[in-house]
């Protein structure tokens, strides 16, 4: 081919490297099709979709300078996944404003209000609750929630005193013999008329669970799902040890692969169970939670089917919600039924926990 003539050694090497990264990008784009436990190596590409996209954009721009015709096939690959890219990086040049009847919804993994930060836990708890109070959402979904009997590290009573959303549905995952309870909680300014919990019986760690809360909103009933799926339990501090490329690196890498496979297995089973429950809902649904998975994933494909991703609908930029060593991960979500309109989605970059809180405004259509 004429376009490949007289490339020279450097450009041939550049082309080979770019081709490899382009194939990896394609792998990430098709990863949601495959069940992640059986095809964990393809699912791993999905985790790195954003990184692979930016690498491919860099190489493609370089070809526009070095040999523009060679950029064409790579541009086609990138454009073929635009709908997937928008899940991670939507752009809205004209943002719609909330209507006069819109209400604020917020979701956050509060990491037990930093209970185990023994020297500063009450100070951090108070700062987090004050932040939530200032936001004062109409609907609040919290994961990794903690409450206790008596006055030991009080959370629920303080929140109910400070929020307009005083109606609470708490689902207990685990508890201990001194009355400490760990689970998820949904607070609502509107009347709660029905509740239920969805437990993942195969899990030893029962802090992963889901709940549904039916609320009366504008004389209609809406079902809110609050979900906390299994984590990969990756220790990101081990990244440095892997990068040292010594004998220990391979041991840690194998441990990571094992953790990833276990995480994929649990989430695969959990999300299918939640989805089956959602499909039987007699009411329009609103889904919030910590899914512990990225937008280009099997988990996202299953949960988002037929629903609108509020971030994609009205957010901007990268929208990363994980506050850790992998700073490009969006793993917390708000989805809603098509009878609901969402606006002004925002990730609030307050580094209280390893997750950033998310919020948006919602309103019912055809009211």
Image: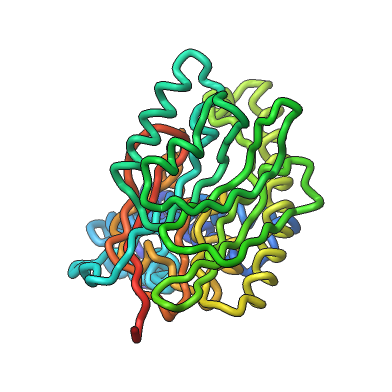
Find the residue positioned furthest to the bottom. 366
Front in this rendered view, residue 188 or 252: 188
Q: Which quadrant of the structure image shows residue 367?
A: bottom left
- Quadrant containing the N terminus is bottom left
Q: Nearer the viewer, residue 117 or 157?
A: 157
The residue lying at 37 percent from left, 72 percent from top is: 79
Scheme of image coloration = rainbow
Q: Is residue 10 above or below residue 33?
A: above
Q: Nearer the viewer, residue 299 or 18?
A: 299
x and y percentages locating residue 256 in the rendered image: 66, 37
Q: Is residue 310 left or right of residue 23?
A: left
Q: For this view, does 60 lie left or right of residue 169? A: left
Residue most toward the right?
202
Residue 10, how many percent across, how many down? 37, 47
Which quarter of the figure has residue 74?
bottom left
Relative image position of residue 48 (x, y in whole percent): 50, 50
Q: Is residue 80 above or below residue 135?
A: below
Up-down: is 329 above or below 326? Answer: below
- Residue at 61% from the left image edge and 31% from the top image edge: 148
Image location of residue 194, percent across then percent down: 60, 66
Q: Residue at (41%, 58%) from the top-left corner?
A: 189
Say whether residue 194 is left or right of residue 140.
Answer: right
């Amino acid at each position: 081919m004429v376009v490949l003539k007289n490339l020279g050694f450097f450009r041939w090497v550049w082309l080979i490297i770019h081709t490899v990264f382009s194939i990896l990008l394609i792998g990430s784009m098709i990863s949601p099709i495959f069940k992640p436990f059986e095809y964990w190596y393809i699912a791993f590409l999905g985790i790195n979709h954003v990184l692979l996209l930016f690498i491919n954009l860099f190489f493609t721009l370089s070809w526009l300078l070095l040999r523009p015709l060679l950029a064409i096939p790579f541009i086609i690959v990138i454009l073929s996944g635009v709908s997937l890219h928008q899940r991670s990086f939507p752009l809205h040049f004209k943002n719609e404003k909330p209507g006069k009847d819109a209400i604020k919804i917020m979701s956050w993994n509060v990491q037990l209000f930093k209970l185990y930060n023994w020297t500063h836990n009450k100070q951090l708890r108070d700062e987090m609750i004050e932040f939530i109070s200032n936001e004062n959402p109409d609907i609040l979904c919290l994961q990794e929630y903690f409450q206790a009997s008596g006055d030991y590290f009080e959370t629920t009573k303080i929140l109910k005193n400070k929020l307009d959303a005083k109606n609470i549905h708490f689902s207990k995952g685990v508890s201990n013999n001194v009355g400490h309870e760990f689970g998820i909680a949904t607070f609502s300014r509107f009347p709660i008329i029905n509740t239920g919990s969805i437990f993942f019986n195969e899990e030893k760690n029962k802090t992963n669970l889901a709940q549904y809360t039916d609320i009366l909103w504008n004389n209609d009933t809406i079902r809110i799902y609050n979900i906390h799926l299994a984590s990969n339990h990756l220790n990101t501090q081990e990244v440095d040890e892997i990068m040292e490329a010594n004998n220990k690196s391979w041991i840690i890498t194998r441990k990571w692969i094992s953790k990833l496979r276990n995480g994929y297995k649990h989430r695969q089973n959990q999300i299918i169970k939640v989805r089956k429950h959602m499909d039987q809902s007699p009411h329009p649904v609103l889904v919030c939670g910590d899914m512990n998975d990225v937008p280009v994933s099997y988990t996202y494909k299953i949960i988002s089917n037929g629903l609108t991703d509020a971030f994609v609908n009205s957010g901007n930029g990268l929208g990363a919600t994980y506050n850790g060593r992998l700073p490009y991960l969006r793993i917390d979500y708000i989805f809603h039924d098509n009878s609901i309109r969402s606006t002004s989605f925002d990730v609030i970059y307050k580094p209280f926990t390893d997750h950033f809180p998310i919020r948006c405004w919602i309103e019912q259509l055809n009211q």
